[in-house]
Image: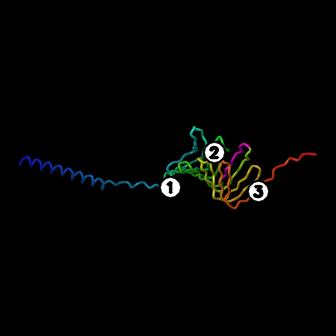
Amino acid sequence: MRERLTSFVAVGLLLALVAGTWWAADYAQRAIPIDPPRRLTHEMDSYIDRFVMVQVDAQGVANARLEGPRAVHYPDDDSYEVRHPRAISQRPDRSITEATAERGVLDQDGDRVTLTGDVRLERRNADDTPDLVIETPEMVLLPNEDVAYTHAPAVVTREDGSRITGVGMHYDNQTRQLRVDSQTRVTIMPRATSQSEP
């Protein structure tokens, strides 16, 4: 009988301990305020002065660069907004292109740069290809593909003064192909001919 009493006391103490622990955990959970999950809003969390981001190829050679006097980072979409950006593509087997604008947004893990405000893209002379300048209010650059496009009105001017205007444009720097989507107007400047004296 004494052994049963000891067992009952032990079981009772164990149950009291379990109940006390459960009550203490429940009380602590109710008494301590738990922070709600952080809402990700489009508010900057950091900034960089004299911003420079360089993309390198598999051999470690720099092939694209984005720079600006200041960039701010937004955590909700992991994007960078760059003031007065300058984007350069400089692959050894292609023409060098340089794009400038009033504002740029780098997103999609660096795969896309959206330029807005007085966008100017210049393809510098390579081999026998004349310089080319594209001006538009907004443009998207895809650095990995070395492609630039816009759905806005664009003006394309060649070094010789020839000019193409239209709405929507796609330029592939690898193939050097330029496509204008609609409302295309082309002005071709005549080539200068040398006149031989009699």
Tell me: 10 left or right of 125: left
Q: Earlier in the sequence, mark 2 or mark 3?
A: 2
Number of numbered discs overlaid on the protein picture: 3
Residue occupying the point 71% across, 60% down: 184
Q: From mark 3 to mark 1, how far is it between C-alphas?
A: 44 Å
Q: For the residue marked with disc 1, what is the amino acid?
A: His
| Element at label 1 | loop
Q: Which residue is mark 2?
A: 89
- Quarter location, residue 138: bottom right
Residue occupying the point 9% across, 49% down: 4
Residue density around tag 2, few if under 14, some if 14–19, many if 20 or more, within 10 Å: many
Image disc number at residue 42: 1
> Are dots 2 and 3 in contact, CB under 8 Å?
no
Q: Which residue is mark 3?
A: 187
Foreground disc of the pair 1, 2: 2
Where is residue 77 shown, x and y percent of the image? 50, 53
Image disc number at residue 93: none
Where is residue 36 shown, x and y percent of the image? 39, 55
Q: For the residue marked with disc 2, what is the amino acid?
A: Ser
View extreme (front): residue: 175
In magenta stretch: residue 116: no
Residue density around tag 3, few if under 14, some if 14–19, many if 20 or more, within 10 Å: few
**Residue segment shown in magenta:** 119-127
